[in-house]
Amino acid sequence: MASKATREGTSRTGDQHWLAAALLILLVGLGLHASGITGVHGWSDDGSAYLRHALNILEGRPYNQIPYANIGEQSPAIVYPPVLPLLLTPLIQIWGIDFRVFQFAMLGVFMLAAVVTLAALGRTFSKWTALAAVALLVLDSELGTDNQHINSDFLGLLWVAAFVWWVEGFDWRAQAGRALAWRSGIAAALLILAIETRTVNAIFLAAVPLCSLWRYRKLTTFAWITPTVAIISVALMSTGSSSADGYLRALQSVFSLAAVRRNIIQYSLSLSDFMGMPNTGGSQWIALAAMAVAIYGAFCLARTARPIWLLTMGLYAPVLLVWPYSDPIRFLIPTLPMLLACFVHGTSTLTEKLPERTGSWIRVGLPLLVLLSSARAYALLPPIESGLNSPASLEMYQAVQQMTAPKSVIASRKPRSLSLFTKRYSVTYSHVAPADMRQEFCEAGVTHVVSAPATFIDDEQYIEPMLAEGGFELLFQNSEFSIYRMTLPCR
């Protein structure tokens, strides 16, 4: 039998190996993602919305004063939560609108979120299971492209992971007096940051009391005080239109059973994109099998532990299925670490009944194969060349400023980026017939139209047919964009 000193030495060696592996994974992930930064921001219009809010803060304008609008049903949130704009303000103050700086800042947020996620998963899983899940997260090619955009997903994940790490660190039933006050206060503050970064994180408001009922069979004082404080604080801080209002309008206007069917298919196959596999029948079956293993791992975990992140994943799934828009990997981010940890846990559980050597090879080899597939996909990723600040886009913005009056109204597929760079009021368009679109433009006071059919399929399908009917004068054209002036008078 091994002595106590021998066991402690073995434990220290294991800890050192784990720490070395964790540092190696984080450094490799940092190097991979940093090498892909070009300074060109992709065509996510959300980044321009966050920059607009940040500029409003810096320049003393009302936070929700925005020079763009949406026409018709295709209407995402107008006013975005304030935490990310507040993070961007010192960067703009020092470096101005510098997208390379923003991309490195987003990468830093992503890596910090990964570290906190590792700690949060360690509250529930073994340290090696937590590390395997974070390795899948950090070394993924799909997320590598996402963190080159200005978006709130990884900053939201940072607060979510910090919240999970915090609330899983003590017994909710034993909290009273001063301990209850400061522990609930910190938990509520992290919830507020999560919600004011990414509105969908409000799902944790319901998860806290439900987790208390699931775990303890009663509603603890901590479980009702924490979300109550967060709800009151968020309500008091809200001014004017909010992102939640925009999301609810979108859900009411474009909800359909077809979207539900599409989401069931896309999210079931989402691990195919995550693992960097080609979109073929074989890879889809592998993705379905991986999702099945993750679900099996979740059920196994629920029998032995009742973590709040697992419950939240169950609450979040119906929201994703009914949501009218889909972005499988990005929309999964609030619960993606738990999904990946359940996949690793499920794999480990399934292989326990196999011979020890065979089980060890599978437990190590399967995540390694996933990482190699993702690395292959990362190596094949082309650099971002077309985006909201690419040379063709900057040339178009300059032409808009030169060829339109300050009070012009420009219709564009990316109104937030156009208004940010040109200081012109911009609107987007709905997916309707040419005659209806022309009428909508007249009602909105549109004077000019920017079209990029080779870049945006919506322009090809909806704008170009309207332009072909006449009533528009071509003012400018480059490799990507055309600028037209409306010449046909409105009725």
Image (spheres, rainbow, N blue to C red):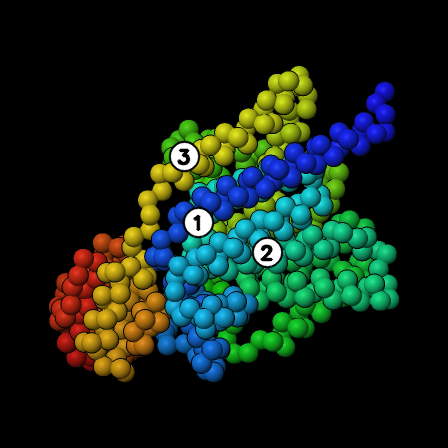
Q: Which residue is drawn at 18% across and 57% down?
A: 479
Q: Quadrant of the C terminus?
A: bottom left
Instruction: Indicate which disc, 3 or 1, sits on the residue closer to the N terminus.
Output: 1
Element on which disc 1 rests: helix
Q: Residues within 10 Å of mark 3 (few under 14, many from 20)?
A: some
Mark number displayed over residue 376: 3
Q: Position of residue 312 (x, y in %)?
A: 64, 51
Three-letter amino acid code of the residue under disc 2: Leu
Q: Residues within 10 Å of mark 1 (few under 14, many from 20)?
A: some
Hey, which quadrant is residue 193 in on the image? bottom right
Element on which disc 3 rests: helix
Residue 481 in view in this figure: yes
In the image, which is nearer the foreground, mark 1 or mark 2? 1
Looking at the image, which is closer to me, 202 or 191? 191
Label 2 belongs to which residue?
A: 158
Q: Cα distance, mark 1 to mark 2?
A: 19 Å
Determine whether label 1 and label 2 are within 8 Å by CB. Answer: no
Mark number displayed over residue 34: 1
Three-letter amino acid code of the residue under disc 3: Arg
Determine whether label 3 and label 1 are within 8 Å by CB. Answer: no
Q: Residue at x 64, y 27 (%)?
A: 350
Q: Cα distance, mark 3 to mark 1?
A: 17 Å
Instruction: Indicate which disc, 1 or 2, sits on the residue closer to the N terminus.
Output: 1
Q: Where is residue 12 in the image (x, y as percent from the top left)?
A: 74, 34
Q: Cα distance, mark 2 to mark 3?
A: 27 Å
